[in-house]
Image (tube, rainbow, N blue to C red):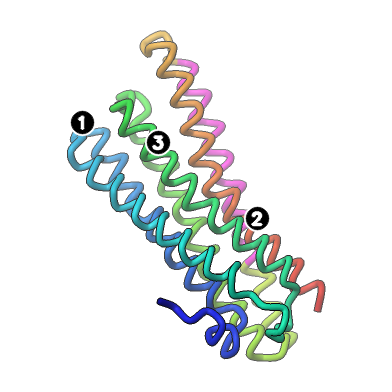
Amino acid sequence: MINISSMFAKSPFKPLRDHMDKVIESIDPLKEFFEALNQQDFSKAEEIQRQVTLAEEEADSIKNEVRNHLSINIFMPINRRDLLEMLDMQDTIADVAQDIVNLLTLRRMRLPAELSQEVIQFVEKAQSVCYMAQGLSQEFGDVLESGFGRHEITKLLGMIDQVSSAETEADDLEDALVRKMFAVEDKMKPVDVVFWYEVFEWIGDLADYSKKTGSRLRLMIAHN
């Protein structure tokens, strides 16, 4: 069992980094998952679903440990409410990843041939935004160790801006994908159109909540 209190005593941000690392495990296999759907390899898809579910559950465990052990007696140079809100945003990424694989596996949904490459490209972009958000965690640790040094803060703010720009690019891919789906929807079952639209929104949420973690970090810096 992780000793969260001792972790905070050494580094106020380390538990959040550990949680984000586990969140990343939940989104790591998503491209492979969609490739399995494209190949109609539902056995592989179900295997990946179990991996994502396990990572999400482990992320939940870390989240709950942080919440339970974040004593007001532990001195931290950052606002506790900001930290907990960021924790929730990170955790939502894993929740959404699980929602995606659960729905697509349970319904055994297949990628429409006309959309398969664009969907995988969209997933890759959303993953890349999540990886960028993971990098923010490490960089913020450097900001803390520097005592909020100007150079470190400037670097972190630049990285946050990059995450925001990448999320906008993911939004653009989502819009293009939805437009293309509507252009070929006559070839799809109406219920599939509805569910795929929901899935596309969830993939976009992966990038959106990654952006929100950066926005919360910006607030933490502003409060110091």
Q: Is residue 174 magenta?
A: yes
Distance from disc 2 to disc 3, alpha carbons, whole Å, reads 23 Å
2 or 1: tag closer to the N-terminus: 1
Q: Which residue is mark 3?
A: 119
- Residue type highlighted by circle 1: Gln
- Label 1 crowding class (10 Å Cα cut-off): few <14, some 14-19, many 20+? some
| Residue drawn 67% across the image and 91% down it | 146
* Label 1 element class: loop
Q: Quadrant of residue 213?
A: bottom right
* x and y, in percent, of residue 122 in the image: 44, 41
Q: Which residue is mark 2?
A: 212
Quadrant containing the N terminus in the rendered view: bottom left
Q: Is residue 145 above or below residue 154?
A: below
Q: Nearer the viewer, residue 160 or 6?
A: 6
- Residue type highlighted by circle 2: Lys
| Residue drawn 33% across the image and 32% down it | 116
Q: Quadrant of residue 192?
A: top left
Distance from disc 3 to disc 1, alpha carbons, whole Å, reads 15 Å
Q: Is residue 147 above or below residue 108?
A: below
* Label 3 element class: helix
2 or 3: tag closer to the N-terminus: 3
- Residue type highlighted by circle 3: Val
In the image, farthest residue toward the right: 223
Residue 73 lies left or right of residue 24; in this view the side is right
Q: Which residue is mark 1?
A: 40
* Rendered image: mark on residue 121: none
3 or 1: tag closer to the N-terminus: 1
